[in-house]
Amino acid sequence: MSSTDTPGHGTSEPGPRDDGVPARAVEKKGQPWYIEIPLLVVIALVLVFVFQTFVGRVYQIPSESMEPTLHGCAGCTGDRIFVDKITYRFGEPQPGDVVVFEGPDSWNEGYQSIRSDNPVIRTLENIGGVIGIVPPDQNDLVKRVIAVGGQTVGGCSPEGGLLVDGQPLVEPYLNEDPSPVRNPLNCAFGPVTVPEGNYWVMGDNRGNSADSRFHMGDEYQGTVPGENVIGKVRTIILPFNRIGTVSSPDISPR
């Protein structure tokens, strides 16, 4: 009899134990912790990058230009908003939409980098900006679309409302009485015909918003090119007492 036939020396799979309980299969060992943890971190960062690049991103409101729709001010904790990056892949911004966009060159005068002066920290911040775990070092702004390509904006109605294509807009979101007696900049400008593919944007807090009205002398006549639009503001996610959707009423002239 060969050695493989000798009882107790076979190579067959283990059978049931004497007490009737099946023998436990040999368990596979997992990756060591020093490999598994960095791998999980990399996967998480990749998922964050993909989400914030293609799906949406959270921004914080730094100023009062969109009051009362969005709250913000210097030295206080502004609203945190979720910006949808998918919608405008399949359509275009419409009048009444609240959008986040990267400021054209003429809007960036006076912009100060938010990066550290320390080269090591600045490098880490830049990497974090690419991944999406820290804000990008660019002048991202939030305003409401008032007119789109081909429309003409500017001038005041007898009631003090802003005119688009010669018709007054109904703007329920405004922070103040739009009467030109109080602030002629609300509507006493232009008229400006918006270039195709561009957008005329204004803050809801008209008396405290450096928007398209203040850049009419640039190459875009104060408008924002479509490629600068990052996404549509959908919701306020913080603070908890302000959580809710951000309205985008149809304000097309009627």
Image (tube, grey):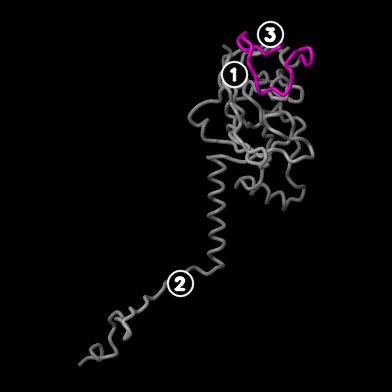
Which is in the foreground here, disc 2 or disc 1?
A: 1
Which is in the foreground here, disc 3 or disc 2?
A: 3
Q: Residues within 10 Å of mark 3 (few under 14, many from 20)?
A: some
Dot 3 or dot 1, earlier in sequence: 3
Picture quarter containing residue 109? top right
State the CA–CA distance, disc 3 to disc 1: 15 Å
For the residue marked with disc 3, what is the amino acid? Ser
Q: Does the magenta run of residues contain 81?
A: no
Instruction: Give the SS element for disc 1.
Output: loop
Q: Residues within 10 Å of mark 2 (few under 14, many from 20)?
A: few
Residue at x 67%, y 18% (from the top left corner): 221
Query: Which residue is situated farthest in the left direction here?
Result: 1
Q: Which residue is mark 3?
A: 157
State the CA–CA distance, disc 2 to disc 1: 62 Å
Residue at x 63%, y 31% (from the top left corner): 101
Q: Which residue is mark 2?
A: 29
For the residue marked with disc 1, what is the amino acid? Ile
Q: Which residues are magenta?
A: 159-184
For the residue marked with disc 2, what is the amino acid? Lys
Q: Which residue is mark 1?
A: 251
Picture quarter containing residue 62? top right
The number of numbered badges drawn on the structure is 3
State the CA–CA distance, disc 3 to disc 2: 76 Å
Residue placed most toward the observer, 5 or 254: 254
Q: Does the magenta run of residues contain 164?
A: yes
Question: Considering only vertical position in the picture, is 115 above or below 254?
Answer: below
Q: Main secondary structure of the magenta part?
A: loop
Residue placed most toward the observer, 185 or 53: 185
